[in-house]
Amino acid sequence: MSTTAQDDRTTPTATAAGPAAATGAGTARPAPAYPRGTRFLLLLAVFVCAACGLVYELALTALGSYLIGNSVMQTSVVISVMVFAMGIGSLAAKPLQRRAVGAFALLEILLALVGGLSVLVLYVAFAWLRLYMPAMVVVSFVVGLLVGAEIPLLMTLLQRIRRQEAGSAVADMFAADYVGALVGGLCFPLLLLPAFGQLKGALVVGAVNAVAGVVVVLWIFRRETRRAVRAGLLAGAAAVLAVLATVYVLADDIEVTARQQLYRDPIVHAETTPYQDIVVTRSTAFTGEQDTRLFLNGDLQFSSVDEYRYHEALVHPALSGKRSSVLILGGGDALALREVLRYDDVDAVTLVDLDPAMTRLARTFAPLSGLNGHALSDPRVTVVHADAFNWLRDATRRYDAVLIDFPDPDTAALAKLYSVEFYHLLGRVLNPESRVVVQGGSPFFAPKSYWSIAATLKEAGYATTPYQVDVPSFGNWGYLLAAPGADGPPPALRLAGDAPPLRFLDDEVLAAATVFPVDRRPADVRASTLMDPAVLEYTRHEWRNY
């Protein structure tokens, strides 16, 4: 049988020592013969392992964004640490090439265990130990170390099956590696998160990693591995699969217990969507009434005890003019929508929210649907699930009033919704006498953020009227009422003559709401743009102290 580089079924002898390596019969010992297709099977293992490695990386960055916010920082730290560790791992694997089969199988056992449990470990570190960042760096380093050590060992194994020029071998292996990374990167948001969630998704990937990296390689090189070594490695892989399966079964209970550590009140609903972590808690307030609270990525969105203060202040000043057609951007809990629908002359409302899980919860979860008065079932309402920025680029309908109820701009994705460019796009859907209201965060806790939003609206061509109210669950909270035309008079802050009965707001409260204390009056701040998201910088710095 031929042993040339072109024959996929054989490999060159392990040494070129010539006659000194000959057997007693004076001939060299033949190298193991591999069935046709063996090399493809090994490249398939490379493909799967690369996909798993990228999923671990994405899972760590996504978890950090959910728990800590600041997605740019989380992504930068995870990628930087992992890439650095991959380089260290590649160097550390050089002495292991002589025992490449066993070393690679052992690495995959460890990687499956560490990667599969990585999300759980970090979530526990965040919930109980408050050591998330150090834990994230350690886990990222270990995963990167193991992923980096794969490369030289896989190259050695590929060369055993068929000797190639270095450039060709590298091209083949990295082609499989990069395509695997592409598939893993797409599977994470499109398959794993929707089907399993973050915690279970990482466990499933760990199991796939163990099978692909250990079983396949040991099967290919079974004749070159001692039986005891092979049995030990297979037992190790089986033990890792058993651990991952056990944690998978217990994952829901573990997640509920860990999550409850983060919230004062009992959790009655929790889910992680491709966009955010949604948690609803319920308890009895000091007044004796039920207190339902919604949290997105750990940030409080409302308390049922006083949410009417927030939503009355948000909605009714903007509806004091024309209001036949109303646009709500954000506000998937439908509480602002509830206030809008109290006006009988509102003919149509379009609500644009990114996350269908949020509006589904507002429609079907009794504590929320009861609170919003089943507003999403009103025939005047059209719900659109889309990114508001992209939706505005294609929107053609015009509106009399626009309510912007986004979370605070503490991530890059949210900061673009507080930019000059976003407000320019908004201008395309406004009628000449339209009124816009923007929730602007807290003028007391985050004054630079608040006044940066005001400066951004002015830069985009709006006249604004800033105002503030007290919402006990949030503290001092601010809004900006705006109208097209920066050179025109600011819109009057008032209630419509036919406004429905309100629990909190009246004209006297609104008159007082325009007065800001001396230490919280307009500051010298920058407008926020896509290329210079100043509001993100201000928000991160100011809220860091609270």
Image (spheres, grey):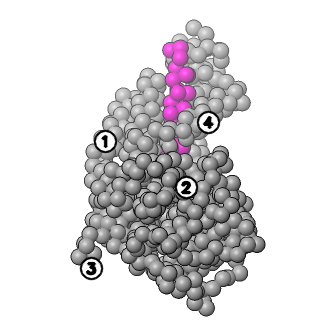
Give the CA distance from mark 1 to mark 2: 53 Å
x, y percentage for residue 523? 67, 82
First of labels 3, 2 by sequence position? 3
**Between marks 3 and 2 in the image, the one whose residue lies nearer the viewer:** 2
x, y percentage for residue 136? 49, 59
**Apparent side of residue 103 relative to residue 520 in the rendered image (left or right):** left
**Apparent side of residue 323 relative to residue 203 in the rendered image (left or right):** right
Residue named by callout 3: 286
Q: Is residue 58 magenta?
A: yes
Along the viewing direction, whichever of 306 and 129 lies nearer the viewer = 306
Q: Is residue 253 magenta?
A: no
Along the viewing direction, whichever of 111 and 121 lies nearer the viewer = 121
First of labels 3, 1 by sequence position? 1
First of labels 2, 4 by sequence position? 4
Q: Amino acid at mark 4?
A: Tyr
Q: Residue furthest right?
A: 487
